[in-house]
Structure formats: C-alpha cells, structure tokens
Amino acid sequence: MSVTKKVTDYKIGIQGNLGANHLNPRGLDANKLNQLLSCKGIVTRISLVRPKLVRSVHYCPKTKKGTIKQYHNEFNLAEDISLKLPNGYPLTDIEGNPLQTEFGFSKYKDLQTVML
C-alpha cells in the first residue's frame, strides 16, 4: 500500500497601501529584513531565466521502486521549511542500488534574479 501526499502550490496577491514600507532601491537595508516591502525602480540588468529543481523523481530498476525528493530553499515557501534536509541529488537508494532520474515527472521552476 503506497501513501501519496498531496502537494498544493499557493499563489498570493497583495494590494493596498504599505505606508512607510514603500521605498526605492537606495532605501533597502538590513533593518527591512522580514518585512513586506514595496520597492519601485528601474531594472537595468537581470540574469538569464534558469530552471530550478523543485521535485525530482527517481526509479530503481533492480528493486522496481520509485522515490520522490522535494528540494526546499529560500525561494520555496513550504509548510516544512524549518526541516533542514540535505540538498544533495540522490544517485543511489538506501541499499546502494543505482537510481535513474525520471525527467518527465520531475518538476522545475523558472528562476531569474535582478542584479543591482
């Protein structure tokens, strides 16, 4: 019997006046950490869009079992983000058998950063 956990992705939108938390890029400093901010400015450089691995699916042909690994980082708001898991990519299972990556079932997210 296999148990699957349903994963829900949330997307939120915020509107309204942020008052003192509305600033320009020069106003960004360490005092503003962990606060919701509104920052207006002109972006002059950005990085290329690169895929970021969110979930990888692996299959072991010897044992005929599959495994799923979730990757948590600073860009992924998950319910168990406090659980620090190693972000290593699995090449073998617990018994040492080699794993094959199922790329069609793995999940990626576009990631792009703003360079100041």
Image (spheres, grey):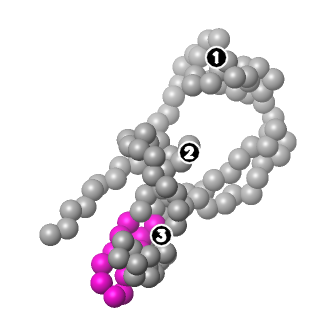
Crowding at mark 1 (Cα within 10 Å: few <14, some 14-19, many 20+): some
What secondary structure is marked by label 1? helix
**The stretch drawn in magenta includes residue 51:** no
Q: Is residue 49 left or right of residue 72?
A: right
Circle 2 is placed at which residue position? Answer: 75
**Number of the label disc, if any, that sits on residue 21:** 1
Q: Is residue 33 left or right of residue 115?
A: left
- Is residue 38 shown above or below 109? above
**Which kind of residue does numbered mark 2 sit on?**
Phe
- Is residue 106 shown above or below 96? above
Going from N to C along the chain, the mark reached first, 2 or 1, is 1
**Which kind of residue does numbered mark 3 sit on?**
Pro
> Can you give x and y, in whole percent of width and height, for residue 5 in the image?
27, 56
Going from N to C along the chain, the mark reached first, 2 or 3, is 2
Residue at left 81%, top 23%? 26
Residue at left 76%, top 52%? 47
Crowding at mark 3 (Cα within 10 Å: few <14, some 14-19, many 20+): some
Residue at left 78%, top 48%? 46
Q: Mark 2 vs mark 3: give the one in front.
A: 3
Marks 2 and 3 sit apart, C-alpha to C-alpha, by 21 Å
- Is residue 28 shown above or below 13? above
